[in-house]
Image (cartoon, rainbow, N blue to C red):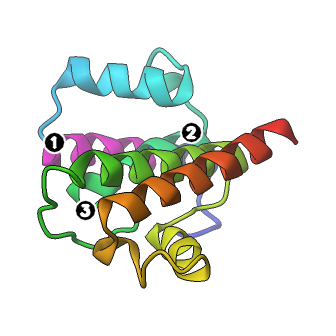
């Protein structure tokens, strides 16, 4: 979309993109409304600003690939909840700071502390350490 297009045209295009992303993710109208309410606090897409529509669209486009946008192999039963928690903490850091924190951020934490080369190769103990570090980072950002 050209930068010179009127804001109303850009917002309408972003709404259409949200509808298309919802359809691609298999969300019905009720699920879409609940998602918009949870992410933005708005009752409908019509009440959302351009930034809020972008936030909803970014959330929908993350899909099943995890927050980093890279595909993961199916984790073992003991690692799956920890990897989901890491994704949730990264998404929350994005919401709080406005900066995208991807799995590369978690990889850097793991490597810096010597727990693992990257999150995908971390054992459950290392994943617990990474979750703790991300949680401490989130608490620090919230305290600012």
Q: Which of marks 1 and 3 is in front?
A: 3
The residue sitting at 36% across, 27% down in the picture is 35
Disc with the residue nearer the chain's start (2 vs 3): 2
Q: Can residue 67 be seen in this view?
A: no
Disc with the residue nearer the chain's start (1 vs 3): 1
C-alpha span from label 1 to label 3: 17 Å
Residue 92 rendering spot, x and y as whole percentages: 55, 43
Identify the main secondary structure in magenta. Answer: helix
C-alpha span from label 2 to label 3: 22 Å
Dot 2 crowding, Cα within 10 Å, few <14, some 14–19, many 20+: some
Asked whether, in this view, residue 73 is left or right of residue 98, the answer is left
Residue 116 higher or lower than 51, as above or below: below
Q: Nearer the viewer, mark 2 or mark 3?
A: 3
Q: Mark 2 points at which residue?
A: 52
Q: Which stretch appears magenta?
A: 13-25
Is 139 inside the magenta-drawn segment?
no
Is 14 inside the magenta-drawn segment?
yes
Element under disc 3: helix
Asked whether, in this view, residue 4 is left or right of residue 23, the answer is right
Placement of the C terminus among the 4 image quadrants: top right
C-alpha span from label 2 to label 1: 19 Å
From this viewpoint, which residue is outermost toward the front? 125
Element under disc 2: helix
The residue sitting at 34% across, 50% down in the picture is 82
The reply to whether the C-beta atoms of the residues labelled 2 and 1 are less than 8 Å apart is no
Which quarter of the figure has residue 119?
A: bottom left
The reply to whether the C-beta atoms of the residues labelled 1 and 3 are less than 8 Å apart is no
The residue sitting at 60% across, 46% down in the picture is 135
Disc with the residue nearer the chain's start (2 vs 1): 1
Q: Name the residue under label 3.
A: 65
Q: Nearer the viewer, residue 144 or 53?
A: 144
Q: Mark 1 points at which residue?
A: 23
């Amino acid at each position: 979309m050209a930068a010179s297009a009127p804001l109303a045209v850009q917002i309408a295009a972003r709404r259409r993109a949200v509808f298309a992303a919802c359809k691609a993710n298999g969300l019905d109208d009720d699920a879409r409304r609940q998602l918009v309410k949870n992410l933005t606090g708005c009752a409908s897409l019509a009440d959302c600003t351009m930034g809020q529509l972008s936030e909803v669209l970014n959330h929908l486009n993350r899909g099943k690939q995890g927050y980093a946008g890279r595909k993961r192999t199916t984790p073992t039963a003991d690692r799956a909840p920890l990897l989901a928690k890491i994704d949730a903490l990264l998404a929350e850091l994005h919401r709080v700071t406005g900066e995208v924190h991807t799995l590369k951020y978690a990889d850097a934490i793991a490597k810096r502390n010597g727990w693992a080369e990257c999150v995908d190769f971390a054992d459950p103990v290392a994943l617990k350490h990474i979750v703790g570090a991300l949680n401490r980072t989130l608490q620090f950002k919230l305290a600012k």
